[in-house]
Structure formats: C-alpha cells, structure tokens
Image (spheres, rainbow, N blue to C red):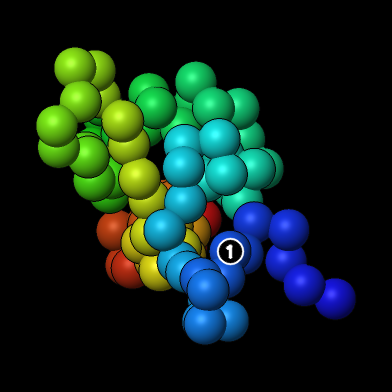
Amino acid sequence: MQNTTEKRDGYGVANEWLTSGEAALYLRIERRTLLQWVRQGKVRAYILSGTQRHVWRFKTSDLDAMLSVPAVLSIDGRIK
C-alpha cells in the first residue's frame, strides 16, 4: 500500500518534498502546530523564493530525523 503523502514525479521517482499540509498530515499534527514549530526552530523547513508570503516546503528525511531525537534526556543520558 502506498503512503498517501508520498508523491512521485513523471518518471515514477518518489519526491520527498512536502507542503505544510502534507507535512502536518505526515506527522499527524495540526498544520498550525507545524508552522509554530518552524518558527521555534524545532522543524527544518525551506522557503520557496519569488513569493510575497512564506511558502514552506519540508523534506521527509528532515521530519523523520526530528522524530528520532529523544524529547527529554536525564542527566546520565537516559531517556525519561
């Protein structure tokens, strides 16, 4: 079964770039939460140039890397 957020180009190659709505769906969070995380520096995002407002794009690899980082570490380095 194909991932609903995975896009393919004209050659059938998977495209890892997602819109903010697609990235929010991928993370299973609200779009406004995702954009707040971008402003806080918690999520890496890329701005498209040539637009009058911020148009964000996200890489699935960046989203996956963000998810793999432990949220809280204790003093001895163990995950709480």
Return the residue nearer the eye: 44 or 47: 47
Return the residue nearer the eye: 11 or 70: 11
* Residue 37 visible in this rendered orientation of the protein: yes
Q: Residue furthest front?
A: 10
The residue under the point 57% across, 44% down is 22
Residue 66 lies in quadrant = bottom left
Residue position for label 1: 7
Return the residue nearer the eye: 68 or 61: 61
Residue 48 lies in quadrant = top left
* Residue 70 visible in this rendered orientation of the protein: no
Q: Give the answer, above or below, for where 5 lies relative to 24.
A: below
What quarter of the picture does the N terminus occupy? Answer: bottom right
The residue under the point 24% across, 18% down is 53
The residue under the point 32% across, 36% down is 56
51 to the left or right of 2? left
Q: Residue furthest top?
A: 52
Return the x and y of residue 49 as percentages of the image width and height.
14, 37
Return the x and y of residue 6 as percentages of the image width and height.
61, 64
The residue under the point 31% across, 30% down is 55
Circle 1: residue type: Lys
Does dot 1 land on a helix, a strand or a loop?
A: strand
Return the x and y of residue 51 as percentages of the image width and height.
20, 25
Q: Give the answer, above or below, for where 15 lies relative to 28.
A: below
